[in-house]
Image: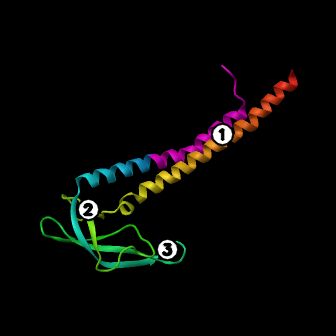
Amino acid sequence: MKNRSPFKNCIVILAIMLALPGMVLAIVGGVWWFNVYRFVQSAEHAEGTVIELVESSGNKGGRIYSPVVEYTDSQGQRHKYRSNTSSNPSPYSIGDKVPILYDRDRPDSANIDHWLYLYLGPLVCFGFAAADLLFVMLLFVIVWLVFGRTKNQTNNAAQ
């Protein structure tokens, strides 16, 4: 078995430490995606009406809007759902009809039936995971090229 230099051991440990957040984000994104998929498969459908656009501060100082939707479940009871997804401009206006998915056992657990509102969170996790893992792979390639050449040059000089 080859002996690794302490420097190579440090590189391997560093790569694992840098890759760990990407792996965690990939797992979180996968679990989140699976939960959304399971929710979509078992959810009841309803038509809701946007009754309010809740204004809040965005991270760059601008204003963002979250739609509040009122819908009626299969038992005839009314519910309100405020989206966790905010944007500017809002894709909805007050009075717009929107498709709603809700849990039949917990009708207050709902979401707007649109890919952006359902899958944005998992996609962001996957995006950051991919960026992190790509960075680590590129770092490995660069280290391999630099230190592989150095080793080859050392071996050639010794011959």
Distance between mark 2 and mark 1 Cα atoms: 45 Å
Q: Residue at x 78, y 30 (%)?
A: 151
* Quadrant assignment for the C terminus: top right
Residue at position x 39%, y 62% from top? Answer: 116
Kind of residue at badge 2: Leu
> Image check: 7 left or right of 21?
right
Q: Which residues are magenta?
A: 1-26
Tell me residue 94's x, y (percent). Answer: 32, 80
Mark 1 to mark 3 CA distance (whole Å): 37 Å
Question: Residue 89: where, in percent of width, then height?
Answer: 44, 76
Type of residue at label 3? Answer: Gly
* Residue picked out by circle 1: 140
**Label 3 vs label 2, nearer the camera:** 2
* Label 3 – label 2 distance at C-alpha: 27 Å
In the image, taking residue 141 as reference, residue 37 lies left or right, namely left
Give coordinates of residue 93: x percent, y percent: 34, 79
Q: Residue under circle 2?
A: 101
Marked residue nearer the N-terminal end (3 or 2):
3
List the residue tagged with mark 3. Answer: 58
Specify the amino acid type for callout 1. Phe
